[in-house]
Image (cartoon, grey):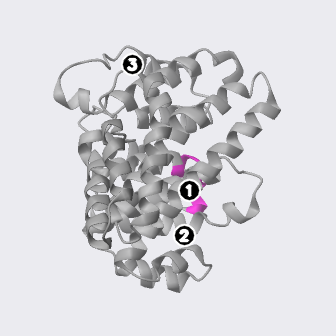
Amino acid sequence: MRVLPSLILVTSMAFGLSGCSIRSYALRSVADALSGPGGNYGTDDDPELVRSAAPFGLKTMEQLSDSLPTHRPIRLALASGFTQYAYAFVNEEADRAMDKSVPLAQQLLLRARRLYLRGRDYALHGLDIAHPGAFQALKGGDAAAWKSALDKATVEDVPYLYWAGASWGLAVSTSKEDANLIGDLPVIDAIMMRALALQENYDDGAIHEFYVAFDAARSEQQGGGPARAKQHLDRAQALGQGHKLGSIVSYAEGVLVQQQKKAEFTAMLKKVVDTDVYSEEPAWKKQRLGNIVARERARWLLSKLSELFAD
C-alpha cells in the first residue's frame, strides 16, 4: 500500500499541462513515484494510520492509471494495495464482527470481496499489457487457454501472477456460497503454480505462504491437505528466515483448529504474540506492518479458544 501525498500538487499540475507528450511524461513521472518502493507502508508501526491514509493513495493511483493504459507498475501497486488493504482491515473487521452482528460481517465481507476482485483485475491488466489476451484467457473457463497464457509468463511477470492469484483466492475465501467464484479455484492454482515454478523465493516465500492457507482449505484428493500445508509452512519460514509471522497464524488457524490440536495451536500463536515486531533489525523492520497484523490476529484467536476447540 503506497501513498505519496506530497505529489498531489505535481499531479494536479500534470493534468493542466498543454501538449500530449509533456502531459504524458509528467503523468508517468508521478505514476513511477507512486508505484515505486519508496512509498511502501510495510515498515510502518501504526496500522490505524495506514488504514486512514491508504485509500487516498489508492484513489490517486487509480486516477493516474486511467490516463496511463500501458503503465504496468502502477497496476501492480494497485493490485497489491487493494488486496493488502482489504485483507488487513476490511476482512479482519468482518471476521471480528461475525460474533456480534452477522449482517454487518456479511456487509464487510462483500466489501472485502469487491476490493479483492478490483486488485485481481489490476494484476491481470498488468499481465495483459505484456502479454495481450492474458486477461481474457485467465478469466475464461478454458484450461488450455490458461496454460497457453501462463506459458508466456516470465520471471518479470511473477509479481503480477502472485497478486492476481492471492487477491482472487482471498475473494473466494469471502464467498463460500458463490459457486461461480468457487469454480475459479483451478485457475487460481494454475496461476500460483506458474509463479512458483518461475520464482520460488518471490518476496521471501510469499507464494508458499499463500499455499499454507490454500492447501489447508483443500482436501488431499484436491491436491492439498494438512501435510501439504505444513510443507509450504516450513518452506515459507525457511525462505523468509523466520521473519514473517503470517504463515504461522494461517497454519494454526487452518490446520490445527481443524485437527483440534489445542496445545500446539496455543504454543504456536503465543510464540507469535511474544515476538518483538517492533525490532529495528532490518529484516524484521521490513516486515513490520504485516507482522503487527499477524500478531493481533493471533491474540484474537487465542481469546477464542473455547469457541475453536471442543475441550
Q: Find residue 237 and report its horizontal and vertical position in percent.
A: 31, 39
Residue 89 visible? The answer is: yes
Which mark is in front, 2 or 3?
Answer: 2
Real-space Cα separation, disc 1 to disc 3, in angstroms: 35 Å
Which residue has dot 3 on it? 271
Question: The residue under label 2 is which amino acid type?
Answer: Val
**Of the image marks 2 and 3, the number of the one nearer the N terminus:** 2
Q: Is residue 86 above or below residue 162?
A: above
Real-space Cα separation, disc 2 to disc 3, in angstroms: 35 Å
**Of the image marks 1 and 2, the number of the one nearer the N terminus:** 1
- At horizontal 53% and vertical 51% (from top left) the residue drawn is 214
Which mark is in front, 1 or 2?
Answer: 1
Question: In the drawing, what numbered circle is on residue 183?
Answer: none
Q: Find residue 30 and report its horizontal and vertical position in percent.
A: 29, 53
Real-space Cα separation, disc 1 to disc 2, in angstroms: 17 Å
Question: The residue under label 3 is which amino acid type?
Answer: Lys
Which segment is the magenta one?
A: 214-222
Q: Find residue 49 and report its horizontal and vertical position in percent.
A: 44, 24
- At horizontal 54% and vertical 69% (from top left) the residue drawn is 187
User: Helix, strand or loop at disc 3?
Assistant: helix
Q: Is residue 220 magenta?
A: yes
Which residue has dot 2 on it? 187
- At horizontal 75% and vertical 39% (from top left) the residue drawn is 107
Residue 227 visible? The answer is: no
**Residue closest to the eye, 248 or 90:** 90
Which residue has dot 1 on it? 118
Q: Quadrant of residue 183?
A: bottom right
